[in-house]
Structures are given as C-alpha cells and as structure tokens.
Amino acid sequence: MLVCSWQRMLAIAVLAGTIAVPVTAQEVTPTAPPPVARAGGVTPYRINPGDEIEVYVWGEERLQRQIRVLPDGTIAMPLVGQLNAQGLLPEQLQEAISKRLAGQYRGTVPQVTVSVRVPSGLQFSVVGKVKSPGSFTPGRYVNLLEALSLAGGPAEFANLDNISIVRKNGNSVTGIRARLENVL
C-alpha cells in the first residue's frame, strides 16, 4: 500500500496560540528563560493572557478582585494601576502589587495573595497522525508525551521519528524535530 509522505509524518504543533506552520528550523533559540522545575519535578505555572486570577489584599475587602489577564498580558486594579502580569509567577505578581500599594499606606502594607483561578491562557494544538487532533488548554505545562497523550496517542502508521514542535513567541516562530520511536 502506497502512503503519501504527509500521511506518514506525525506533526505535533505545540503553540502558545493555535497556529500551524511548516517547520524548517532545527533548534529553538529561547527568548525567555525556561520555567525551572520546583522540588518534586513540578514546573511552576506562569501567568498568561486569558488567565483568571484572584487578588486578595488582607484586611481590605474593597481590593479583593477576580481579574482576567488582558490579551496584552496586563491587569489593572484600584490603587495599583496597570501591571504587566504575563510570564510572572503568582508570587512575583504578589510582590509587584505590594510594591505599588506601599505608596498608598502609612506603615505596614497589607499582605497580598495572588492565585490563578482559571488558567486558560496556556493553549496548544496537536495535528497530524494522532487519534484525536485538536486544541487543548490543560491549565499547566505539558511535555511532548503528555501532549501526545491528550490527543489520544499516535494513530496507526504514525512516524514517531519525525515529530515537529512549533512554538510561536510574539512575532517569531521557531521549531525543533523530536524522535519518539524508541520511547513509546
């Protein structure tokens, strides 16, 4: 049976958005430092556009807010103004809000807590020879095997030695090739 080369290739596009483009690059040049795994091997979640976060300022009910991170990565709050939240850990955003509030209080600044309620900004697509291609919003960082699993696993005749990972960061698109034949 003769099968076209595009049918033999398993292309997995892992994106910040949902764009699929041909890949010719062989390595990724990182523009931001990769997330570092915490104890236990769990990668900390960084805030993304579209995430719903909760900000709680202890003792100040009027400052408790549920805020959606805007497409440009910013949030806005009374007494704080507009802040860039994209790419920050919740703890880093807490610190930034506390610094902004320091000018509004005499003495001790109330404790600030930031939590991600609905992590909807982290999205990727899986296309090609998989059982259930589509877009996924897992709410956490996933590796290549987890992305493949979310897409139902490889379909019959999938070429696991020719996987393309495509990432879009701002206006640039980069890609790498992965080989999973010996892993699965």
Image (spheres, rainbow, N blue to C red):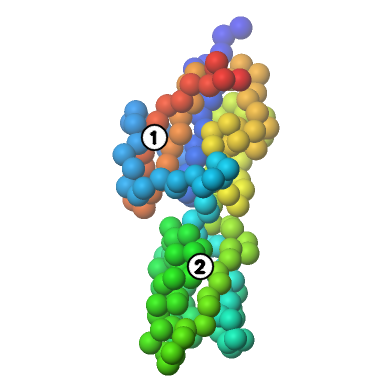
For label 1, the SS is strand
Front in this rendered view, residue 83 or 99: 99
- What is the x, y in percent for residue 63? 56, 84
Dot 2: element: loop
Q: Quadrant of the C terminus?
A: top right
Q: Residue at x 39, y 35 (%)?
A: 175
* 173 sits left or right of 41 in the view: left
Q: Quadrant of residue 119?
A: bottom right
Which residue corresponds to the image point at 60% horizontal and 52% vertical from the top-left? 139
Residue at image mark 1? 175
Indicate the position of residue 125 as horizontal and vertical percent values. 55, 41
Q: Nearer the viewer, residue 19 or 35?
A: 35
Label 1 packing within 10 angstroms: few (<14), some (14-19), many (20+): many
Image point (59%, 26%), residue name:
129
Inspect the image, locate mark 2, and give the three-letter code of the amino acid beneath it.
Val
Residue 127 in view, yes or no: no
Q: Residue furthest bottom?
A: 106
Comes first in the chain, label 1 or label 2: 2
Question: Residue 178 at x, y = what percent?
Answer: 46, 25
* Vertical arrangement, residue 105 with respect to residue 96, above or below: below
User: Which of the numbered marks, if any, corresponds to residue 139?
Assistant: none
Quarter holding the N terminus is top right
Q: Is residue 165 left or right of residue 116?
A: left
Give yes or no for contact between labels 1 and 2 (Cβ–Cβ under 8 Å).
no
- For label 2, the crowd category at 10 Å Cα-Cα, with few meaning under 14, some 14 to 19 and many 20 or more, is many
Specify the label residue 69 is tagged with. 2
